[in-house]
């Protein structure tokens, strides 16, 4: 459904954890939103968020997203739903929102097996489902697509992104800001494009050294694959290299590879005193108190996207850089600023009918040109600045 010009929209936010309240805050402060409905299964989390947000425009309700019918009933009359749930359950919320006839903005992607069905059902309801709409996936993909659109021929797309603590502490010099009680650790191969072909590399393989302005401690990066949404862009065909890497403080990969070699990251249960226990579950339970972001701790989010290729017969490149810090005044983490603000802005674009596509709409298709500029301008108003650099050589491209 689209909001008629001059009318106000109703927005639902599912998940009152680390990202949902920031999405809610941004929507509550918007003059084109009449109501924000915050949904969670935990009443205590809702009450805490409600007290913090302190707005007459806010409603809260307890709802299990696995109850598809119940969720759809809760979402009746909602124009746009923003889903900020962990990856293990976010896909349930998509179906309830579609059933309610609500547009969807999701921080994650639904399982590959569900995409065609989501696309078909959303189109039949006349709504759009915009997945992967945070910082990564999200901004990284959109910036890469923008660089690709600006070139005649694309040779390479390289992406770096990461959230790191401003004051790193042992044991990992890393803090969990979003995603629940589990460290984002997934050993195994990931796909990249090298030499024009897809190949696999171990995830925790060190990439080239990297540095960002304002961060004086050594950094490193490891492989995360590449954004497969870019394959929907015609100019991406024939690209010689495409990689995406996660940024951490130096020494992180060595520690993770050690833990993996010890078997502590395995999801396969082992029997301990007659009980089946997955090593990663036990490890997560032990380490979570040491790596969760505590009240008052601050974080940094970094991003770099470089797209190289040909423009007018010459070599050219687009570079996008971001170093974002914790918002001390509003007490909003950098990860929430870059992720939740992005989702909130896109949600209102949907509500105003500025995104015309229906069905499963990836950000690289639905948010480009004028809409991407609008998104970046809105983020800059919120203190999130992305610097763009264009370079071109006069010599003939080869």
Image (cartoon, rainbow, N blue to C red):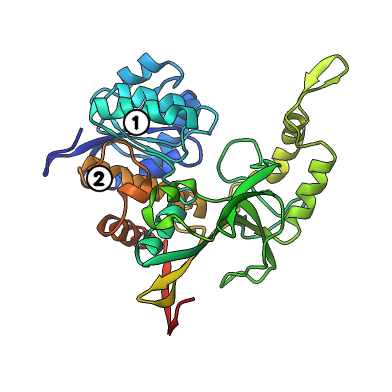
Residue name at image x 30 percent, y 61 percent? 373
Residue name at image x 41 percent, y 26 percent? 93
Q: Earlier in the sequence, mark 2 or mark 1?
A: 1
Q: Is residue 72 left or right of residue 181?
A: left
In the displayed structure, would residue 338 be above or below residue 152? Answer: above
Name the residue furthest bottom: 394
Measuring from the top left, give residue 265's x and y in whole percent. Answer: 75, 37
Label 2 vs label 1: CA separation? 15 Å
Dot label at residue 355: 2
Which corner quadrant holds the N terminus?
top left
The residue nearer to you, when weighing 80 against 359, is 359
2 vs 1, front mark: 1
Q: Quick one: SS at disc 2? A: loop
Q: Quick one: SS at disc 1? A: helix
Q: Is residue 22 left or right of residue 57?
A: right
Measuring from the top left, give residue 341's x and y in whole percent. Answer: 39, 50
């Amino acid at each position: 459904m689209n909001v008629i010009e001059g009318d106000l929209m109703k927005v639902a936010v599912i998940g009152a954890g680390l990202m949902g309240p920031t999405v809610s805050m941004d929507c509550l402060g918007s003059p084109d939103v009449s109501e924000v409905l915050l949904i969670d299964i935990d009443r205590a989390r809702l009450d805490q968020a409600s007290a913090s947000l302190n707005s007459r425009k806010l409603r809260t309700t307890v709802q299990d997203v696995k109850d598809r019918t119940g969720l759809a009933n809760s979402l009746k009359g909602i124009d746009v739903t923003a889903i900020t749930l962990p990856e293990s359950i976010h896909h349930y919320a998509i179906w309830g929102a579609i059933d309610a006839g609500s547009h969807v903005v999701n921080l994650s992607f639904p399982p590959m097996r569900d995409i065609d069905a989501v696309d078909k059902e959303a189109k039949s309801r006349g709504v759009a489902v915009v997945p992967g709409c945070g910082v990564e996936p999200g901004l990284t993909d959109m910036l890469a697509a923008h660089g690709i659109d600006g070139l005649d021929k694309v040779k390479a797309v390289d992406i770096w992104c990461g959230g790191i603590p401003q004051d790193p502490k042992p044991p990992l010099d890393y803090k969990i800001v979003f995603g629940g009680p589990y460290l984002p650790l997934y050993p195994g191969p990931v796909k990249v494009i090298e030499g024009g072909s897809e190949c696999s590399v171990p995830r925790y393989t060190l990439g080239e050294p990297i540095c960002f302005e304002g961060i004086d401690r050594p950094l490193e990066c490891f492989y995360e694959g590449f954004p497969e949404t870019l394959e929907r862009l015609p100019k991406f065909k024939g690209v010689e290299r495409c990689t995406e890497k996660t940024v951490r403080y130096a020494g992180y990969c060595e520690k993770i590879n050690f833990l993996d070699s010890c078997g502590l990251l395995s999801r396969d249960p082992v029997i301990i005193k007659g009980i089946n226990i997955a090593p990663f579950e036990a490890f997560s339970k032990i380490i979570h108190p040491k790596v969760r972001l505590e009240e008052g701790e601050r974080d940094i989010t970094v991003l770099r996207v470089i797209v190289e290729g040909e423009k007018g017969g010459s070599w050219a490149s687009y570079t996008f850089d971001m170093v974002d810090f914790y918002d001390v005044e509003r007490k909003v983490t950098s990860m929430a600023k870059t992720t939740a603000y992005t989702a909130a802005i896109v949600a209102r674009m949907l509500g105003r009918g500025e995104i015309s596509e229906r069905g499963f709409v990836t950000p690289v298709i639905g948010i480009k040109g004028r809409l991407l500029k609008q998104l970046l301008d809105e983020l800059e108003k919120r203190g999130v600045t992305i610097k763009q650099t264009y370079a071109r050589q006069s010599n003939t491209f080869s």
